[in-house]
């Protein structure tokens, strides 16, 4: 069992940056593939980025490639999402998730644990 708590969301102007953090409980954080997803009202939750348990492999949605970077610090039980060049269409609730599957998975059903989400709002 792992508990995930996101932080770092907020309001930012288009072109700005935010860094989201997700702190995980438990001693087995380094075993999990970690992912970030986002959701806007009325739409399905969508994949944003994922990172392997070692941190050596990553995967990104086409819509964020070149702008977002996922990373992790296994010593701190934390995964990050650095978001640059933000656009209004990036506005959503962002969720952190953990998966037993390796090396990198991108489907909603692949993830076993979820955080409560953090709101990111990008103004034009």
Image (spheres, rainbow, N blue to C red):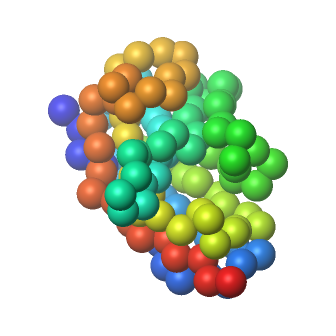
Find residue 14 and report its image quarter: bottom right
Residue ID at (70%, 49%): 64
Residue ID at (56%, 44%): 48
Residue ID at (67%, 26%): 56
x, y percentage for residue 107? 44, 27
Q: Is residue 40 visible?
A: yes
Q: Residue furthest top?
A: 102
Is residue 79 placed above or below 29 in the rendered structure? Answer: below
Left or right relative to 78: residue 5: left
Q: Is residue 78 visible?
A: no
x, y percentage for residue 21? 48, 59
x, y percentage for residue 72? 56, 43
Residue ID at (68%, 83%): 124
Q: Total number of numbered labels?
A: 0
Q: Residue furthest left?
A: 1
**Residue closer to the observer: 100 or 89:** 89
| Quadrant of the image containing the N terminus | top left
x, y percentage for residue 83? 66, 61
Left or right relative to 85: residue 74: left
Is residue 63 placed above or below 56 in the rendered structure? Answer: below
Is residue 109 placed above or below 118 in the rendered structure? Answer: above
């Amino acid at each position: 069992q792992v508990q995930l708590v996101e932080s770092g969301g907020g309001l930012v102007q288009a072109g700005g940056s935010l860094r989201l953090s997700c702190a995980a409980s438990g001693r087995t954080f380094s075993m999990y593939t970690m992912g970030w997803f986002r959701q806007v009202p009325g739409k399905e939750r969508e994949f944003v980025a994922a990172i392997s348990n070692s941190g050596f492999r990553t995967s990104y949605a086409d819509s964020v490639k070149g702008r977002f970077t996922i990373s992790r610090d296994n010593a701190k039980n934390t995964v990050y999402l650095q978001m640059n060049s933000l656009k209004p269409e990036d506005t959503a609730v962002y969720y952190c998730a953990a998966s037993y599957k390796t090396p990198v998975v991108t489907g909603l059903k692949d993830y076993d644990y979820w955080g409560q989400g953090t709101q990111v709002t990008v103004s034009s």
